[in-house]
Amino acid sequence: MSFKRKLNLFDATMLVVGNVVGAGIFTTAGFLAGELNNPWFFAGIWIIGGLLTLCGALTYAEMTSMFPRSGGDYLYLKAAYGPWAGFLLGWICFWIINPGSIAVLSIGLVKYLTGFLGHPGVLGEKLMAVVVVLLFSTVNYRGVRLTGTSQNFWTMGSLAILLFFIIGGLVSGKGNWGHFAGGETGLPPMSKLLGPAMIAVIFSYSGWFVTAYIGDEVKRPERNLPLSLTLGTIIVIVLYVAINAVYLYAIPIESLKGVVNVGQVAGERLMSSGFVQAVTIAIIFAIAASINATVLAGARLSYAIAKDGFFLSCFEKLHTQHGTPHVALLIQAGLACLYIAVDTFESLLSAVVFIMLLSSIGSGMAHLILRRRKPLLERPYRTRGYPFVPVLFIVAYSYIAVQIFLSSPARSVLGVAITVSGVPFYLYAIYRGNENATKGVLLPHLLDRRSSDEER
């Protein structure tokens, strides 16, 4: 049994937008205003960060057309460096990144919901977060078409409110266009322009590569996967720049410093006090879309690794009726619920941020390596601006990775150690594969599938 291609270009694009747009766009402006006390640099850094993100999307776009299957970075790392690289990424994603992200997002969603429902206490919040995990996992369990439809609902709901906020705010007449002329003059130090401010912006754009993980379920993947990455990223760039323009229109740069709930403050000034609730609803919709997309992509990564024989075979089983990797979804949900119950897991998730950056850098370099090693490999889409676009992406993410490491070396080393802990399990999978091959059992990851990848 194999996946069914039920997602179109619109579905895939909404996955990208929904997975990127989160609470960060409503909370980072106060920090950025403190770093960049000039309205044009405050708004411009979102354009710069967006263009760097677009370089990443264009880099991945070529590889999605080369490998239009489920797996994302796993496929690219495996093709460029060998199965070990893809396995180690999958190892850390399976145990920490995917379930940890789902847990964090679910807890965040509950905290915003309690603004409407009342605070149920710490235990109540945890139980609500578990319910959220189970709800979204059930939707994914029931089929990718239902998942795509629900993703469209959450994303479009958030976008509708944000567009109303942008258009209504700018035409309200309650702001001041003179705010764009205030602040400090002159070019800010590069340490500020490319320091914590840029890191915050890049992380606000993170999640743009989600459709690379669901290639088996997208119609015309050689066309729609590259397009979804590109269009989704462009939509987010325009959205982010416009939202920050609204912030500046409502609040002068000096008054923005340190404001955490900037979306709510700007909404009150430009619209009405009741619009605060609308902003909260937009955040709830955005977080819900991110949870849905993470649940979807995480299970597909486990499926791809299991299909190559490096995870337990149960992970590659598809539900006979719904066509989803149900075992992977259930185990992923169980881990997320476990993390919700454990208060210290967020430190583990922060420890692997360095690894997440390294995997993106490795995939960017894989683009260059595969161009050289396998020039005849079919590429329905070829990255425009090659090699400058992928090189710029690699350099930007490498810079951020270095900054992350320097700011918390012990935590970064811990992330590396957790990743390397998967090596014995990879070696065992190789051993079992060789043993079965000797007995005449042809394992896909060692024989048929590996040779077919080589031929491509």
Image (cartoon, rainbow, N blue to C red):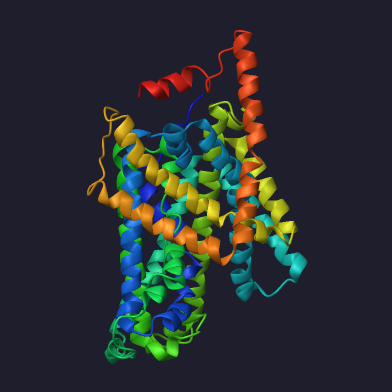
Q: Residue at x 42, y 60 (%)?
A: 399
Furthest toward the right, the residue is 123
Left or right, residue 369 beside residue 284: left
Question: Count the marks: how many?
Answer: 0
Residue 365 position within the rendered picture, expressed as x and y whole percent measured from the top left = 38, 44
Residue 326 vs residue 347, the one in the foreground:
347
Could you say which quadrant of the image residue 322 lies in?
top right
Q: Is residue 237 left or right of residue 108?
A: left
Q: Residue furthest left?
A: 385
- Residue 371 visible in this rendered orientation of the protein: yes
Residue under the image location 47 percent in, 71 percent down: 196
**Residue sitting nearer the eye, 205 or 228:** 205
Check the picture and name the quadrant holding the C terminus: top left
Q: Which picture quadrant has residue 40?
A: bottom left
Residue 253 locus on image (x, y percent): 38, 87
429 with respect to 234 (left or right): right
Residue 288: horizontal and vertical position, in percent?
Answer: 53, 59
**Residue for point 47% across, 22% down:** 450
Against 453, is 171 above or below?
below
Q: Is residue 390 left or right of residue 333?
A: left
Percent x, y of residue 164: 36, 74
Q: Is residue 296 above or below residue 429?
A: below
Q: Is residue 220 visible?
A: no
